[in-house]
Image: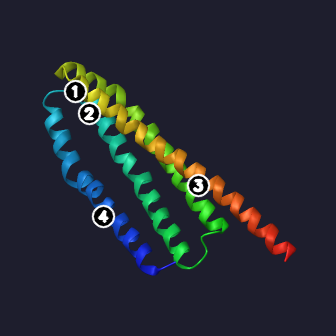
């Protein structure tokens, strides 16, 4: 595979990491400060903590994506290392979805107080997006396992 195509994907991984990093550093503290004026701390702290906690599996998944791209560069795409990277990405996506689902009750209370039903719907969409990624990673993992098995069978017969 041409090295330039994976280089573009690696740069893309870094680019999608920047908004979440900026969100964690700049935006979430402002949201917490603003929300503390209107809502009690026992509503804000769990929600903000869960949002910060989602950043950890997000960056782990991005790191695994970078590792997967480096395996492709080294012609090790059909290896157990690639399967393991996809498995970790799948688990990270499920973890993100669970943490965001844990924030949903707090979001529903805020949406009811502000009379904003679109906020709750947006929260549901954001919660289900990582599930789609996890299912996609699971399908890729299974396909890669099957391809590795077929490759090993062909190597044994040759």
Please tell me the numbered disc located at residue 15: 4
Which residue lies at the image location 20% right of the left edge and 23% below the top edge? Answer: 116
Which residue lies at the image location 78% right of the left edge and 69% below the top edge? Answer: 152
Is disc 4 in contact with disc 2, using a CB cutoff of under 8 Å? no
Q: Report helix, strand or loop for mark 1.
A: loop
Q: Quadrant of residue 21?
A: bottom left
Real-space CA distance between mark 1 and mark 4, rounded to the nearest whole angstrom: 35 Å
Discs 3/4, front: 3
- Quadrant for the C terminus, please: bottom right
Is tag 3's residue or tag 4's residue first in the polypeptide sequence? 4
Discs 4/2, front: 4
Is tag 3's residue or tag 2's residue first in the polypeptide sequence? 2
Is disc 3 in contact with disc 1, using a CB cutoff of under 8 Å? no
Q: Position of residue 123 (x, y in %)?
A: 32, 33
Q: Residues within 10 Å of mark 2 (few under 14, many from 20)?
A: some
Real-space CA distance between mark 3 and mark 1, rounded to the nearest whole angstrom: 44 Å
Q: Which residue is mark 2?
A: 44
Q: Report helix, strand or loop for mark 4.
A: helix
Real-space CA distance between mark 4 and mark 2, rounded to the nearest whole angstrom: 29 Å
Q: Please state if 139 lies on the left or on the right of 131 as rendered.
A: right
Real-space CA distance between mark 3 and mark 2, rounded to the nearest whole angstrom: 37 Å
Please tell me the numbered disc located at residue 140: 3
Q: Residues within 10 Å of mark 3 (few under 14, many from 20)?
A: some
Q: Is any part of residue 95 visible from this angle? A: no
């Amino acid at each position: 595979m041409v090295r330039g195509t994976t280089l573009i994907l690696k740069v893309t991984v870094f680019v999608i990491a920047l908004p979440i990093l900026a969100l964690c550093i700049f935006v979430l503290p402002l949201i917490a400060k603003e929300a503390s004026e209107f809502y009690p701390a026992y509503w804000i702290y769990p929600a903000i903590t869960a949002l910060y906690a989602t950043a950890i599996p997000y960056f782990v998944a991005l790191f695994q994506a970078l590792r997967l791209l480096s395996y492709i560069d080294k012609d090790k795409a059909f290896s157990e290392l690639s399967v393991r990277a996809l498995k970790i990405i799948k688990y990270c996506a499920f973890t993100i979805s669970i943490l965001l689902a844990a924030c949903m009750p707090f979001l529903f209370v805020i949406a009811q107080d502000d009379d904003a039903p679109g906020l709750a719907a947006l929260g549901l969409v954001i919660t289900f997006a990582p599930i789609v990624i996890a299912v996609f990673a699971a399908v890729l993992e299974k396909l890669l396992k099957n391809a590795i098995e077929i490759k090993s069978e062909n190597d044994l017969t040759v």
